Image: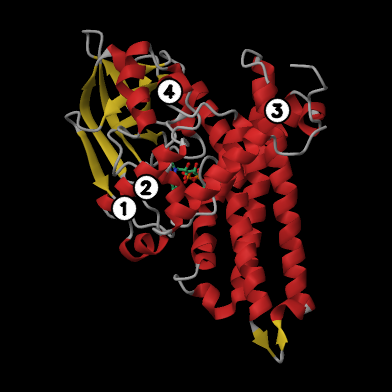
């Protein structure tokens, strides 16, 4: 068993740290203005391309960094330290695009990897959240091989800047859940409303309406009826990356809190000398270290897995749920303690701990709530048994 970072992983971690430091300069601008200027976006884009960390999940031949899942987790752990969700400026085309046809690759994935196009994933609806199979957006065949899309999508992250959407709709009359690639400037696609959320996110999460939106057969991603499988694959990867990012965020919050506790004197003593403060620090160290180890382990297991082993994919789906549940809950505890250690200052938006505390809350909700992760894990325990869930799964040389 080898726990050291390989030279390549150490290099990636260092590059991600340097990129994170560059992007961190834009946090205050983002918090003040609920977003950053076009000029700042351009500066970040140039820095991302210079770092070689663009589209880390996309093969090198299509312009991405082509990282393994473990390598991606190490990079996301660093980027997670950014407040205002500025980690999302380091673009990563949604993983269902691995099913793109050669034409779709040319049109979406390759420019997306370069940072010249941007996707947003539109699955959720007013009445289809945790149960995304309840989605009611329809794709009615138009009689000429194309489809007419009608419906409404909620919470579309990056929807304000995306130029195409990855939309889950049901092909009628069989109600076959299917993913469509839809350019935002297609007639009938409209942003209906942009709600304000708890966090200050570098992008928005608009609600979209689709009114008689005409698309060709070439808009179908993966195949008719593949929609739920592609959505689950997207969740699996995203859940692991949420695990990685939230742990990075927790590390930043704890580092700031420990520095503050050393400096801040109350009652004649630095806070760090107080046992009640020490308890919060120790519990946070436990939360971070145990969850980072688990995230790395499961990411490594993904890299060993045979992608054609359907049973194993289901187990890994449940392992990613374990990571997401454990890491997002643990990092929420850490940022809450960090706010407490900062006292009143921890409640001021100028302080990164305040922003992290607000921003990490959504990690217990999106890409499946904590309750849904528990259902996924328990379902796996019931269906395939505990053994795979509780083990590392691989022995030396096995693949
Ligand atoms: C900021 C933000 C960004 C988002 N970005 C995107 C995006 O880019 N694309 C996208 O498609 N979606 C996105 N979402 C939607 C997100 O995935 C959903 O909010 C999430 O899946 C929960 O669905 P819901 O809000 O409808 O809550 P509901 O499903 O209504 O759940 C409400 C509560 O009931 C619980 N619950 C539901 N079902 C069960 C059950 N069977 N057993 C026990 N408890 C249950 C839930 O855990 C939760 O506590 C985003 C959401 C937010 C807040």
Q: Nearer the viewer, residue 42 or 118?
A: 42
> Where 394 sits versus 266, above or below?
above
Q: Secondary structure at mark 4?
A: helix
Q: Dot 3 corresponds to which residue?
A: 301
How far, Cα to Cα, is label 4 from label 1?
A: 28 Å
Q: Evaluate if marks 2 and 1 touch, with contact meaning CB atoms under 8 Å apart.
A: yes
When the figure is inspected, residue 230 is found, relative to residue 239, above or below; the finding is: above
- The residue indicated by pointer 2 is 44
Q: Nearer the viewer, mark 2 or mark 3?
A: 2
- Which secondary structure, mark 2? helix
The image quadrant where one finds the C terminus is top right
Seen at 54% across and 55% down, the residue is: 360
Where residue 8 appears, x then y in whole percent? 63, 33
Earlier residue among tags 1 and 3: 1
Would you place residue 130 above or below residue 213 in this image? below
Look at 55% across and 40% down and name the residue there.
Answer: 368
Residue 95 is situated, as x and y percent measured from the top left of the image, at 48, 27
Mark 2 to mark 3: distance in Å?
Answer: 32 Å
Q: Secondary structure at mark 3?
A: helix
Locate the N terminus and report the quarter of the image it occupies: top right
The residue carrying pointer 1 sits among few (fewer than 14), some (14 to 19) or many (20 or more) residues within 10 Å by Cα, namely some
Which residue does the numbered mark 1 point to in the structure image? 40
Where residue 155 appears, as percent x and y from the top left, is 38, 44
Q: What is the quadrant of residue 117 in the picture?
A: top left
Mark 2 or 4: in front is 2
Looking at the image, which is closer to me, 389 or 94? 94
| Mark 3 sits near ligand 1, with its Cβ under 8 Å away | no
Q: Which residue lies under the disc numbered 4? A: 97
Q: Disc 2 to disc 1, how far (Cα)?
A: 6 Å
């Amino acid at each position: 068993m080898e726990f050291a970072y390989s030279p390549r992983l150490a290099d990636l971690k260092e590059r991600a740290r340097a990129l994170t430091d560059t992007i961190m300069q834009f946090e205050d601008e983002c918090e003040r203005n609920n977003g950053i200027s076009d000029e700042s976006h351009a500066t970040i884009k140039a820095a991302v391309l210079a770092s070689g960390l663009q589209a880390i999940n996309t093969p090198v031949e299509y312009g991405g960094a082509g990282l393994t899942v473990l390598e991606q987790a190490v990079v996301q752990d660093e980027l997670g330290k950014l407040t205002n969700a500025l980690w999302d400026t380091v673009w990563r085309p949604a993983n269902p695009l691995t099913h793109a046809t050669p034409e779709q690759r040319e049109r979406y994935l390759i420019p997306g990897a370069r940072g010249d196009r941007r996707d947003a994933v539109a699955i959720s609806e007013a009445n289809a959240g945790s149960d995304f199979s309840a989605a009611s957006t329809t794709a009615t065949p138009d009689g000429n091989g194309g489809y007419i899309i009608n419906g409404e999508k909620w919470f579309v992250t990056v929807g304000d800047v995306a130029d195409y959407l990855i939309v889950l709709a049901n092909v009628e009359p069989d109600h076959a859940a299917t993913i469509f690639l839809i350019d935002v400037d297609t007639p009938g696609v409209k942003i209906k409303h942009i709600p304000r959320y708890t966090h200050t996110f570098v992008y928005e999460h608009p609600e979209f309406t689709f009114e008689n939106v005409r698309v060709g057969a070439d808009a179908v991603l993966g195949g008719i009826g593949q929609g739920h499988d592609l959505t689950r694959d997207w969740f699996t990867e995203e859940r692991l990356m949420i695990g990685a990012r939230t742990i990075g965020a927790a590390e930043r919050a704890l580092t700031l809190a420990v520095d503050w506790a050393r400096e801040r004197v109350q009652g004649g003593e630095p806070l760090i000398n107080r046992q009640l403060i020490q308890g919060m620090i120790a519990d946070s160290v436990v939360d971070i270290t145990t969850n980072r180890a688990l995230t790395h382990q499961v990411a490594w297991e993904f890299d060993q897995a045979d992608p054609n082993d359907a049973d194993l994919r289901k187990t890994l789906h449940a392992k990613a749920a374990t990571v997401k549940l454990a890491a997002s809950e643990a990092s929420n505890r850490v940022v809450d303690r960090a706010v407490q250690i900062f006292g009143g200052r921890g409640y001021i938006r100028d302080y990164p701990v305040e922003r992290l505390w607000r921003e990490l809350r959504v990690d217990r909700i999106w890409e499946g709530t904590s309750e849904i992760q528990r259902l996924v894990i328990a379902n796996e325990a019931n269906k395939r048994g505990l053994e795979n869930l509780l083990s590392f799964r691989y022995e030396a040389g096995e693949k």
